[in-house]
Amino acid sequence: MDGHADGTATGHAEAWETRIGVPESFTAAELETEPDELPGGAAWGPLIEALRELLDEVAGSLPEQERAIALTRQVEHWSAQLRQDQVPEVLQAFGHRVDLHGRGQVMAPAFVLTARGPDSVEGTVTFGRYFLGGNGAVHGGAIALLFDEVLGRLSDTSSRPPGRTASLTVNYRAVTQIGKPLTVRARFEEESGRKRYLVGEIWDDGILCADARALFLGLRADQD
């Protein structure tokens, strides 16, 4: 959720099915729609999980040249197959499956919800090898991306109009390790008109790894 928004009018929330990329929930339990009726169907979730695993394996591998060449041909073949199934953004499953952890996409680490309140969420995240910065630590940009993802999703809940990120400040407090389940907490700090201030934290047991404060602006009815 990037970009900017301006103006003062307040928009009206639409049904979650039509709010492309804007989740109204964090778990399938809150939805009445069956996976087969959602974009990508029941097969989309396993495909994304397999892709996550593939990216982690690629990041940590050093294949021999012959294997790399063979794999390149396979990936090119997969791309050619998927090229036949391209659809407009409004129809895509990637990033739009609010019933799946991580919204059914691999751009950001998958946030797994464990608790939710009226204006807060808590869950876990495990950064895979794909998000490695160096020396076993998560890349700082991946941490900021996770905060933008979770805080942005929370910003758009409870039938609020879709919003966009206006600012995001991240403080890196301690090394965030890859391959380890971490606790993520996010909550509303303040809300005034179209302005939504949210804060988030990433914890490794009792160690605060990073915290963030973000401002999201709800879109006007004439914005998208």
Image (spheres, rainbow, N blue to C red):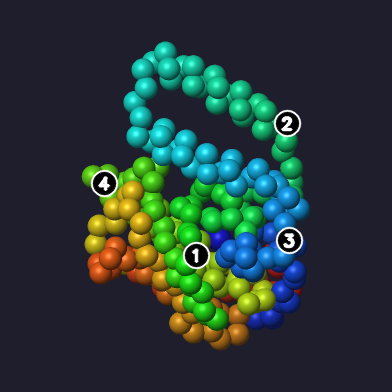
Toward the viewer: 108 or 25?
A: 25
Q: Residues within 10 Å of mark 2 (few under 14, many from 20)?
A: few
Where does label 3 land, which residue? 33
Toward the viewer: 42 or 79?
A: 42
Q: Secondary structure at mark 3?
A: loop
Toward the viewer: 177 or 218?
A: 177
Q: Is residue 27 left or right of residue 146?
A: right
Query: Which sits earlier in the primary sequence, circle 3 or circle 4?
Result: 3
Point 75% across, 69% down: residue: 15
Where does label 4 land, which residue? 136
Toward the viewer: 72 or 214?
A: 72
Q: Amino acid at mark 1?
A: Leu
Query: Which sits earlier in the primary sequence, circle 2 or circle 4?
Result: 2
Mark 2, mark 3: which one is toward the viewer?
3
Point 53% across, 55% down: residue: 102
Placement of the N terminus among the 4 image quadrants? bottom right
Q: Are marks 4 and 1 in contact (CB under 8 Å)?
A: no
Q: Secondary structure at mark 4?
A: loop
Q: Secondary structure at mark 1?
A: strand
Where does label 2 land, which residue? 84
Query: Which sits earlier in the primary sequence, circle 2 or circle 3?
Result: 3
